[in-house]
Image (spheres, helix red, strand yellow):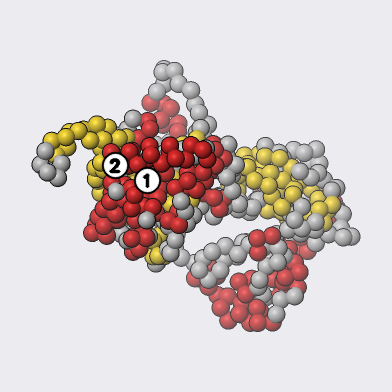
Amino acid sequence: MPTEILMPALSPTMEEGTLAKWLVKEGDTVSSGDLIAEIETDKATMEFEAVDEGVVGKILIAEGSEGVKVNTPIAVLLEDGESADDIPSAGTSDGGGAPAKADAPAAAEAPAAAPKEEAKAAPAAPQGADGSRIFASPLARRIAADKGLDLSQITGSGPKGRIVKADVMDAKPQAAAAAKAGGTDTGPAAAAPAAAAAPAGPSADMVARMYEGREFEEVKLDGMRKTIAARLTEAKQTIPHFYLRRDIQLDALLKFRGELNKQLEGRGVKLSVNDFIIKAVALALQAVPDANAVWAGDRVLKMKASDVAVAVAIEGGLFTPVLQDADSKSLSALSSQMKDLASRARDRKLAPHEYQGGSFAISNLGMFGIDNFDAIVNPPHAGILAVGSGVKKPVVGSDGELKVATVMSVTMSVDHRVIDGALGADLLKAIVDNLENPMVMLA
């Protein structure tokens, strides 16, 4: 039976994408693992691999189509012995490369055209018991549904663990038994009620009418800007933020940094203040392990290593690449990795695993002359450190004498569901101690 190739979810947060380029054409034979298209997500352009073998019978979505929803049919794959005549008319293009619009595929527009029974659409993407998506090819899902198999009991052999036809054909009987015993949790009766929709702001037309007679330029939102807007709105609405502020004296750090950079000149390494901040945060998360955690809906996950995310501004948005195991890496290694991640972030060349994860983030606007600001927690992180610029200020020393020092203001935004006030204060104190006594970070 013809197999629909669906728009893939290339990251956990992806809801739609742009079909940037087809790497195959109708009539081409493809095998599992072959590259067939380039998909542009909100963060990067990624290559999409075939998970089944066959002949490309029909391309449903044209190159350059934007806003293609995840799980929308984008092409049809034919098996041995099948021809274009086996493809149902609903959902296909006119043969001239003019498919239905991505946001309203023809397959969803023609309920009156009854497709052949053998070419019915694959069941919806299944989910595991914990709510996580189970990745399976459309053909594998159809066969599993026909045989009454529970996909959560089947181990996939395809790319990145995807379940393919061979896996369900070889599935053990217990997979079917598990589906029969516990399959009711995916039925409508067990579905959680939809959350009430958040109040919407004024529509685009309403806002435009407010400015009738005034000159303006409409700027179309790209995928990244849409995602930033959605995620940060969600974060502000659903995360109970609280804020902790401290001033940090940087004179010892600046002196120590200058000495280290002189010694590292021969190796071509130049440490930045931000490198020290990353290291200070990573070590503080180890010193206060209860704060090294993330919110997971109905539980808190306490992390072992310190995976620190760092906000990087790019044209039109930002990335938060993650430095894994930052607590165990040297300052020079962190500096080199951060430069590489930031460079590839600006070119939108990061892979999803390089900007997902982490338990804590850093946003540094000090280089832009910002004295202090409050950052928004990026879920599921438990907190984010907003870093301002270092400026000369009069301070009272421990001996009671007035002196001038370089002072940097920081604000830690915290998710109160994960970290309480006292625990947050302990974490911020550990960060401050590391930065004011930088040699300790090398011990």
Foreground disc of the pair 1, 2: 2
Horizontal placement of 319 versus 47: left or right?
left
User: Mark 2 = which residue?
Assistant: 252
x then y, percent, for residue 272: 42, 39
Horizontal placement of 242 versus 102: left or right?
left
What whole-number distance in Å separates the C-alpha atoms at marks 1 and 2? Answer: 14 Å
Give the total number of marks visible in the rendering: 2
Determine whether the residue tagged by mark 1 lies in a helix, strand or loop: helix
Compared to residue 295, the image places residue 389 above or below, namely: above
For the C terminus, which image quadrant?
bottom left
Label 1 crowd bin: few (<14), some (14–19), many (20+), radius 10 Å: many
The reply to whether callout 1 and callout 2 are in contact (CB within 8 Å) is no
Horizontal placement of 185 versus 175: left or right?
left
Label 2 crowd bin: few (<14), some (14–19), many (20+), radius 10 Å: some
Quadrant assignment, res 251: top left
Query: What residue is at 27 percent from the left and 32 percent from the top?
Result: 391
**Badge 2 amino acid:** Ala
- Disc ID at residue 28: none
Query: What residue is at 38 percent from the left and 37 percent from the top?
Result: 258
**Badge 1 amino acid:** Ile
Examine the rendering and report whether any part of residue 83 can be seen.
Answer: yes
Horizontal placement of 286 versus 147: left or right?
left
Determine whether the residue tagged by mark 2 lies in a helix, strand or loop: helix
User: Mark 1 = which residue?
Assistant: 277
Query: What residue is at 56 percent from the left and 68 percent from the top?
Result: 128
Query: What residue is at 51 percent from the left and 52 percent from the top?
Result: 356
**Which residue sits furthest left?**
400
x then y, percent, for residue 428: 28, 52
x then y, percent, for residue 415: 33, 55
Q: Depth check: 41 or 414 in front? A: 414
For the N terminus, which image quadrant?
bottom right
Q: Depth check: 160 or 89 in front? A: 160
